[in-house]
Image: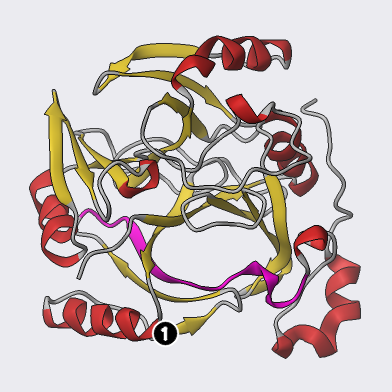
């Protein structure tokens, strides 16, 4: 079996309104779903992406106001990397500078320009200027002109101590192919060649283990076509010796979880049913959506959640 690539990334944020303001107003992503952490319904789970939340474009956040900041290091997804058009680097550098972002234009990576900066919680973000396809549906109300807009993910980085073990998992169990190597960085590609969200980088590191908290990625999810394929993957991973969770219904997709040999939390998520099962396309993200088990507690949950309004970075 071969995954088509990345389904979503989930990170940890502090203030949810500041998080909302950054990703909609600065990066031009759409809030496609506001719901709660299914394991902690007193906190938000916010989903950002393209116009409809296409797999490969979805960045989600658990929001825990007042929680401690995490630390960088190995055993984590070290950066969230987005695809942008090859000729958009100057636009993004100016756009980010105008909004007070400290930006770093790093050396090209596999021949592609890279612009690095952090979000309002210190999460490392990258814009990769790539000709690889970004299979997304543009959000018509984005403040970013469509020719410069984010086109989904592009090779986020896994920072690990033993890359050979992570490579074995990616290639033998998830269907990735080796793409190339630069220094201590290896790139892999899944699915149909040339899709930006089908790529992932593995960076060999001797850094101390990261502490996953605010400003870190919590987990990375890969795509399964449907629940039947997901179950086959679960059985395959169990036979390979991985500890895999039962299938969990997340309303908008089903999920299984396990850790890679470097202790990074991996998820395999189904492409469907998607975000339009409880909202129309035009209304995505406008109201708080709860799983059926929490609907009887709606008033109590709404009473403890902070008011959510896009806030300025300051």
Query: Relative to 88, does residue 16 appear above or below in the rendering?
Result: below
Depth check, front residue: 223 or 141? 141
* Magenta-colored stretch includes residue 312: no
Residue 182: percent from the left, percent from the top?
15, 24
Q: Which residue is mark 1?
A: 247
What span is colored magenta in the figure?
262-279
Tell me the quadrant of the picture where the N terminus can be found.
bottom left
Residue 45: percent from the left, percent from the top?
66, 61
Depth check, front residue: 114 or 208? 114
Query: Relative to 190, does residue 277 appear above or below in the rendering?
Result: below
Q: How many marks?
A: 1
Tell me the quadrant of the picture where the C terminus can be found.
top right
195 sits to left or right of 123: left
How busy is the neighbourhood of tag 1: few (under 14 within 10 Å), some, or many (20 plus)? some
At 46% from the left and 28% from the top, the residue drawn is 126
Residue 52 occupies which quadrant of the picture?
A: bottom right
Depth check, front residue: 278 or 208? 278
At 48% from the left and 27% from the top, the residue drawn is 127
Residue 220: percent from the left, percent from the top?
40, 55
């Amino acid at each position: 079996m071969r995954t088509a690539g990345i389904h979503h990334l989930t990170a940890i944020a502090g203030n949810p309104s500041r998080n909302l303001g950054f990703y909609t107003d600065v990066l031009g992503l759409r809030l496609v779903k506001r719901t709660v952490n299914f394991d902690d319904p007193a906190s938000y789970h916010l989903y950002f992406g393209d116009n409809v939340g296409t797999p490969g474009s979805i960045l989600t956040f658990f929001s825990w106001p007042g929680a401690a900041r995490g630390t960088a290091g190995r055993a984590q997804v070290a950066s969230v990397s987005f695809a942008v058009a090859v000729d958009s680097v100057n636009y993004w550098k100016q756009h980010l500078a105008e909004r007070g972002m400290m930006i770093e234009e790093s050396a090209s990576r596999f021949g592609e320009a890279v612009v690095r900066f952090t979000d309002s919680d210190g999460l490392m973000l990258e814009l990769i200027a790539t000709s690889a396809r970004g299979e997304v549906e543009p959000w018509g109300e984005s403040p970013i002109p469509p020719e410069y807009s984010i086109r989904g993910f592009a090779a986020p980085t896994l920072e690990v101590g033993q890359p050979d073990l992570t490579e074995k998992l990616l290639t033998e169990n998830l269907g990735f192919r080796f793409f190339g190597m630069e220094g201590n960085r290896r790139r892999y590609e899944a699915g149909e060649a040339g899709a930006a969200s089908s790529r992932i980088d593995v960076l060999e590191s001797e850094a101390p283990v990261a502490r996953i908290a605010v400003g870190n990625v919590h987990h990375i999810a890969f795509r399964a076509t449907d629940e039947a394929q997901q179950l086959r993957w679960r059985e395959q991973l169990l036979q390979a010796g991985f500890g895999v969770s039962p299938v969990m219904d997340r309303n908008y997709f089903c999920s299984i979880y396990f850790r890679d040999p470097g202790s990074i939390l991996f998820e395999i998520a189904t492409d469907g049913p998607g975000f339009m099962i409880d909202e129309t396309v035009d209304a995505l993200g406008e109201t708080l959506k709860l799983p059926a088990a929490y609907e009887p507690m709606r008033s109590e949950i709404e009473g403890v959640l902070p008011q959510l309004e896009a806030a300025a970075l300051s």
